[in-house]
Amino acid sequence: MSNSSINWLPVLIAFVAPFALGATMMFASFRLWKKWIRWVTRATGLLFLCGFLTAVACSAPYMWARHLEARWHPAKPKTKVELESFLSLYSQRDIQPSESGWGRHHQLQAGERMTQYLLLWNAPLEVVYTSSDTIVGIYTSYE
C-alpha cells in the first residue's frame, strides 16, 4: 500500500508516454509542409491521445478503489457505519457469496448477509455483515 512498493516506470510508460507522444505529434504536425504527412501525423497523434484517455478511464475505478482502501484498511472498521464513512462514489446491493469475486467460498451463517459495494460502479468490494451491521469479513476483488 505504501508508495515505496510501487514501481513507477511502467506507470510512466503506460500513461505519460502515449500522452506526450500524441500531444507532440498533434502540435508538430503544424510544422510539416506536405498535407498528407500532416494528416497522417495528426491522426496518429489523435490515436495516441485516445489510447491515453481510454487507459485513464479504464483504470480510474481501480485507482479510486486503491485510494479508498488506503484510507479504510489502516482504520480497521468494525461496523457498517465506520466502513461507509470512508467510502464515496459507490453503489451497493446485497449478494450471495456465489456472486462474489473473492468471497465465493464464504459460508453465510444465520443472520449474516453479504453486501457488494461497486466503487465508481465497477471495482467491487464485498463485505459480510451480521444482523447488527458488525463486519465479519471484507473481500476486495480489485486487487
Image: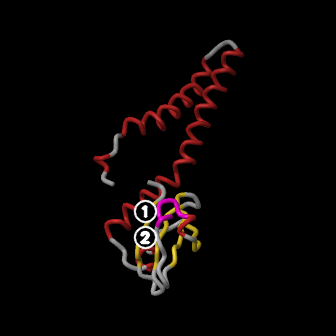
Choose the circle earlier in sequence order: 2 or 1.
1
Query: In this picture, is 35 found above or below 115?
Result: above
Tell me the quarter of the picture where residue 68 sits.
bottom left
Q: Where is residue 59 drawn, in percent x and y?
A: 52, 48
Q: Residue at x 56, y 47 (%)?
A: 58
Image quadrant occupied by the C terminus: bottom left
Residue nearest the observer in this picture, 133 or 82 = 133
Tell me the quarter of the picture where residue 94 sits.
bottom right
Side of 99 where 68 appears, left or right = left
Q: State the mark number for residue 68.
A: 1
Q: Where is residue 11 drawn, in percent x and y?
A: 42, 39
Q: Start and end of the magenta stretch?
A: 100-105
Side of 48 where 34 appears, left or right = right
Instruction: Decide whether residue 68 is among the magenta residues.
Output: no
Q: Residues within 10 Å of mark 2 (few under 14, many from 20)?
A: some
Image quadrant occupied by the N terminus: bottom left
| Amino acid type for the residue under numbered disc 2 | Phe
Q: Is mark 2 in CB contact (under 8 Å) with mark 1? A: yes
Q: Residue at x 51, y 59 (%)?
A: 101
Q: Residue furthest left?
A: 4
Instruction: Decide whether residue 104 is among the magenta residues.
Output: yes
Query: In this picture, is 113 found above or below 56?
Result: below
Tag count in the figure?
2
Magenta highlight: main SS: loop
| Amino acid type for the residue under numbered disc 1 | Leu
Q: State the mark number for residue 86.
A: 2
Q: Where is residue 44 drawn, in percent x and y?
A: 63, 25
